[in-house]
Image (spheres, rainbow, N blue to C red):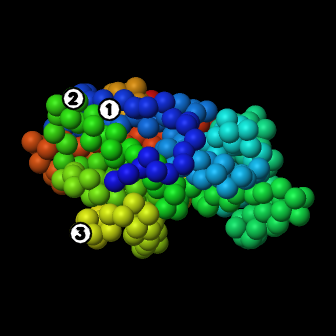
Amino acid sequence: MDLARFPTFSLVHRPTPLEHLKHLSTALDGPKIYIKRDDCTGLAFGGNKSRKLEFLIGDALEKSATTIVTVGSMQSNHVRQTAAAAVKAGLKCELVLDWRVPWTQAAYGNSGNILLDRLLGATVHLCSRDEGRNDKADEVMAAIEARGEKGYFIPTGGSNAVGSLGYVDCAVEIMEQVKQQNIKVNHVVLASGSGGTQAGMMVGLAGAGSSISCIGIDIDHDPVSVRAEVAGIAAKTAELLGVCAQVEKAELELAEGYGAPEYGMPNPKTIDAINQLAQTEAIILDPVYTGKAMAGLIDMITKNRFGKDEAVVFVHTGGGPGLFAYSDIFENTP
Ligand SMILES: *Cc1c(COP(=O)(O)O)cnc(C)c1O
């Protein structure tokens, strides 16, 4: 696997730490649990999208783009990291955001990620729930071209083959750390939404011939679509890297049942997981992605999905700023 031949723009503080979650491992009495701190990627409060953006912005600069355009929901972590990456790269940035999540707290529309998007100087286009945000982004792209500038469109979550290379890079980093720390790891567990993170991790592990498996947790409450997205992006990423044969043999594992009631809406187990990690490990999770993924990991451990002699790496994909848009949930905590 030769990642060095793709253009990149440096954004990530690497390597991010790989740490043992001692208290949680003891409390659950299952496998040894490690955490890969991709919430600490460093760019404007960090998160998984920064790794994807290293390759996406690298591609945009190579294509002489002047303006980055992307889409997402009001509290999108991807959108916030894209706005930050554009600042670092000296590019303009236009965002198309919608409020499709049925969460009505005022902070959802003016705090957390959206506050940071504005602070980072991005142009924000709001679109209604029924207006398609991709259609609106087409209009924004056309207006940029009409001004004689060059737009570069990044799809939802930065999830395409180029963006996924960022998680191939993360897989390589984890394998190096496992070796350096002289530990044994059997599984990597992560939140899967638009699919690029799981696709990249799968391709990275399988492409390197690792025996570590990758388990995605469906946070959209739509496992059929998420699985199809992951499979499609993984195939394209494998092709880009020339590792199709290895990746075809890898199993695509997506755990379901933890994403209810829908994207952007936590359930009671999500909130329990957020409280538990804060109070046992001082790890801050979020209600949209990592809280659901951690609730899934805890449930799988409780159901003896893993051996006690095994070790699992939970990838903390970030999302902390989104927590502030959901403060009403935690009014009665602890
Ligand atoms: C986007 C995101 C994910 C999911 O990554 P995908 O590549 O979209 O599947 C997980 N966690 C956080 C915090 C995210 O922002």
Q: Which residue is mark 3?
A: 249
Inter-mark Cα distance, 2 to 3: 28 Å
Residue 294, visible in the rendered structure: no
| Residue in view at x 44 percent, y 68 percent | 236
Which badge, 2 or 1, is on the more N-terminal residue? 1
Label drawn at residue 18 = 1
Left or right: 326 in relation to 22: right
Which badge, 3 or 1, is on the more N-terminal residue? 1
Q: Which residue is mark 2?
A: 181
Query: Could you classify mark 3 by the number of other residues whose Cα lies within 10 Å: few (under 14), some (14-19), or many (20 or more)?
Result: few
| Residue in view at x 26 percent, y 65 percent | 246
Identity of the residue furthest to the front in this view: 5
Disc 2 C-beta below 8 A from ligand 1: no
Residue type at mark 1: give it: Leu
Residue type at mark 2: give it: Gln
> Observer-nearest residue: 300 or 170?
170
| Residue in view at x 60 percent, y 53 percent | 59
Which badge, 2 or 3, is on the more N-terminal residue? 2
> Observer-nearest residue: 198 or 4?
4
Disc 1 C-beta below 8 A from ligand 1: no
> Observer-nearest residue: 299 or 88?
88
Q: Reply above or below: 119 against 210.
A: above
Secondary structure under tag 1 reads: strand
